[in-house]
Image (cartoon, rainbow, N blue to C red):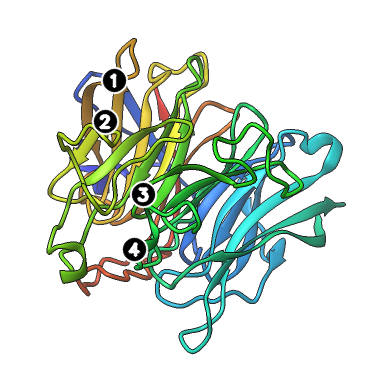
């Protein structure tokens, strides 16, 4: 844990010391956001961030633009709303930005949809539905959306609080999906004519690929003690995602000995509620190849160090209890790490006041 951070933040460039003696410099990158969920940088340096109530915001030259880049009439109910954002790997040519959001209401059927926007002269245009009618709910909706190293679009879908669907390949609930950028199904997916890439997941919310090995990792929220979940709780997971892999939910959760299912790399008990995930890829970073996990309940940025086989060799909690709930984590083109608080809304968490002036924030962290 990095201690004394609140005092550090009184400086423009604060300094603290991590357990491995790296020097950390933290500053606020943007403030006054409402539940920022995901963020990516375009090749021109602009940062695009989703806000769960249904807005895409732009941060340009260090300034949060007053007007949203795009807005959508999303569900915005409990944990539902606008979530994952992915910038096209060919952005300079096609100007495409993809976003996933939940639509519907408690009296209607909830669905997740993926849209593609075009960036035209700095303004969103041509919203196009790419994938529709993905099952959703107002809590376990998943939400991660990212392009993998293979140029395919990966999507995380939660179990929508219907655990009977998770082990069925006839349902998209509790799955990681893989699409072509136009929304069609790749011919090399593991199950014929299906977007399913992996299954047996409760509520995955963060994706990352190691910069060298291209190993695919995902975070997952563990059970919350509901009777329908066998009164299990905690057991949050970090998983290595394999093509066609079955991760066992709801038959197993956390570390287990059932050889039918893939075991997690990490089990967090007590739960930290892992959300955003990023793999450090800047060649000059001393954390190159590390995984960074945003934790909501744990109120920390977790740094996970991998060995040469992609297994966990070390983990530390940064800023624990200092900033509140941490959600998105992204690496910038400058090699800095950007992460957000999510203090305005706390669905499923104890109702306590953790908001601070200007919440929610996006922070910029540099490591030396």
Secondary structure beneath dot 2 equals loop
The answer to whether residue 353 is above or below residue 211 is below
Q: Are marks 2 and 4 in contact (CB under 8 Å)?
A: no
Q: CA distance from mark 3 to mark 1?
A: 20 Å
Mark number, residue 164: 4
Task: Count neighbours of disc 2 (C-alpha within 10 A) and say few if under 14, some if 14 to 19, many if 20 or more.
Answer: some
Residue 231 appears at what percent x and percent y? 12, 64
Task: Count neighbours of disc 1 (C-alpha within 10 A) and say few if under 14, some if 14 to 19, many if 20 or more.
Answer: few
Q: Residue at x 15, y 57 (%)?
A: 233
The residue that mark 3 highlights is 201
N-term-proximal mark, 3 vs 1: 3
Q: Residue at x 73, y 47 (%)?
A: 184
Mark number, residue 311: 1
Q: CA distance from mark 2 to mark 4?
A: 25 Å
Residue 208 appears at what percent x and percent y? 47, 34
N-term-proximal mark, 4 vs 1: 4
């Amino acid at each position: 844990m990095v201690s004394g951070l609140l005092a550090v933040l009184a400086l423009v460039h604060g300094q603290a010391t991590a357990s491995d003696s790296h020097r950390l410099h933290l500053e606020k990158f943007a403030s006054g956001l409402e539940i920022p969920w995901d963020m990516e940088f375009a090749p021109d340096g602009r940062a695009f961030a989703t806000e769960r109530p249904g807005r895409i915001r732009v941060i340009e030259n260090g300034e949060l633009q007053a007007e949203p880049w795009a807005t959508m009439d999303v569900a915005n109910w409990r944990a539902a709303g606008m979530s994952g954002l992915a910038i096209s790997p060919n952005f300079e040519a096609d100007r495409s930005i993809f976003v996933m959001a939940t639509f519907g209401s408690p009296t209607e059927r909830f669905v997740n949809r993926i849209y593609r926007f075009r960036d035209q002269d700095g303004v969103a245009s041509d919203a196009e539905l790419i994938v529709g009618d993905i099952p959703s709910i107002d809590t376990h909706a998943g939400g991660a959306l990212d392009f993998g190293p293979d140029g395919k679009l990966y999507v995380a879908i939660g179990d929508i609080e219907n655990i009977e669907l998770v082990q069925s390949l006839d349902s998209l609930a509790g799955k990681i999906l893989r699409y072509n950028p136009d929304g069609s199904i790749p011919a090399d997916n593991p199950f014929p004519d299906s977007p399913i890439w992996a299954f047996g997941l409760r509520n995955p919310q963060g994706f990352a690929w190691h910069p060298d090995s291209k190993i695919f990792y995902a975070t997952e929220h563990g059970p919350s003690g509901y009777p329908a979940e066998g009164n299990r709780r905690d057991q949050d997971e970090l998983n290595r995602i394999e093509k066609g892999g079955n991760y066992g939910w709801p038959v197993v959760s956390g570390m287990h000995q059932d050889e039918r299912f893939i075991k997690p790399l990490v089990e967090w008990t007590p739960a930290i509620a892992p959300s955003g995930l990023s793999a450090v890829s800047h060649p000059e970073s001393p954390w190159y190849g590390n995984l960074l996990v945003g934790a909501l309940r744990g109120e920390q940025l977790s740094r996970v160090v991998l060995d040469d086989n992609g297994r966990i060799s070390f983990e530390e909690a940064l800023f624990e209890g200092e900033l509140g709930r941490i959600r998105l984590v992204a690496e910038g083109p400058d090699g800095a790490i950007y992460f957000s608080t999510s203090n305005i809304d706390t669905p499923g968490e104890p109702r306590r006041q953790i908001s601070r002036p200007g919440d929610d924030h996006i922070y910029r962290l540099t490591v030396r």
